[in-house]
Amino acid sequence: MTMRRNYSSARRATQSVSPAAQKRLKQLYKRWHWGEMPTHVVDTDPDLPEHLIEIGLLMEFHLRPFGAKDSTVLAVREDDIPNSHVGFDADHAHQRIYFQCSPALRESGRDLYEMSEAAAHDLGDIAAELGEGRHATRRGYVRTRVKPLGHLTHLVYFTHKKGDGPSGYIHEMGEEGGVPPVLCVSRDGRFWLAGGSYTCPSPGITN
């Protein structure tokens, strides 16, 4: 099973990508994965940004609901992990993070959406009103209605970085005085981040 993936939007299936753009994306992937080269492209939902670099395969969200002291774990089913991806926008100034959710993960997301008593709002409005940090702005977000679930305290993913081999990584969102993003879900069961102080430079996710 290949765990090293570089992906972009489904538009790539019908639109050509210039050799210069391909080279840039490959180099970004290589730097982020400490020298590992991408092996293939994975298509993503058409409304996601055009150039996404895969961080890894999504394993867990650690969510702290608003007003709660402790976090709960939203785990991706083990056999579904290869179909769930975490990636960052290569064209965004602060490398905004997005998720490509598998059908099973979306089913769980739809259940969370229906159970939530929160009102649905535009994702960009959630970022501006509830979020803090570099991503707390209405600009540049996908136009979708979401319900906020709470703060994402940790993101767990599986990937291949040179020197580490295939490994699971757990990143604390908002570490070292940073601001954790708000985890949101849309009616179709897709997960989104709003706000937060994180960036994704070549060493990995930082705050």
Image (cartoon, rainbow, N blue to C red):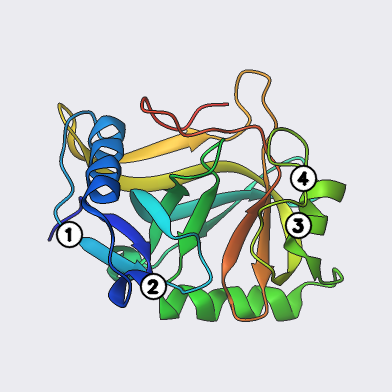
Point out the tag, 4 or 3, that comes first from the N-terminus: 3
Q: Classify mark 1: helix, strand or loop.
A: loop
Q: How many marks?
A: 4
- Residue labelled with disc 3: 124
In front of the other: 151 or 34 = 34
Residue 68 picture location, percent across and down = 79, 46
Please name the amino acid that badge 2 sits on.
Arg
Please name the amino acid that badge 1 sits on.
His
Which mark, residue 11?
A: 2
In front of the other: 94 or 157 = 94
Residue 200 picture location, percent across and down = 47, 34
Q: Classify mark 3: helix, strand or loop.
A: helix
Which circle, 2 or 3, is nearer the viewer? 2
How packed mark 4 is, by other alpha carbons closer than 10 Å (few <14, some 14-19, many 20 or more), is some
**Residue 167 seen by the camera:** no
Q: Are marks 4 and 2 in contact (CB under 8 Å)?
A: no
Which mark, residue 148?
A: none
Q: Classify mark 2: helix, strand or loop.
A: helix
Point out the tag, 3 or 1, that comes first from the N-terminus: 1
Q: Classify mark 4: helix, strand or loop.
A: loop
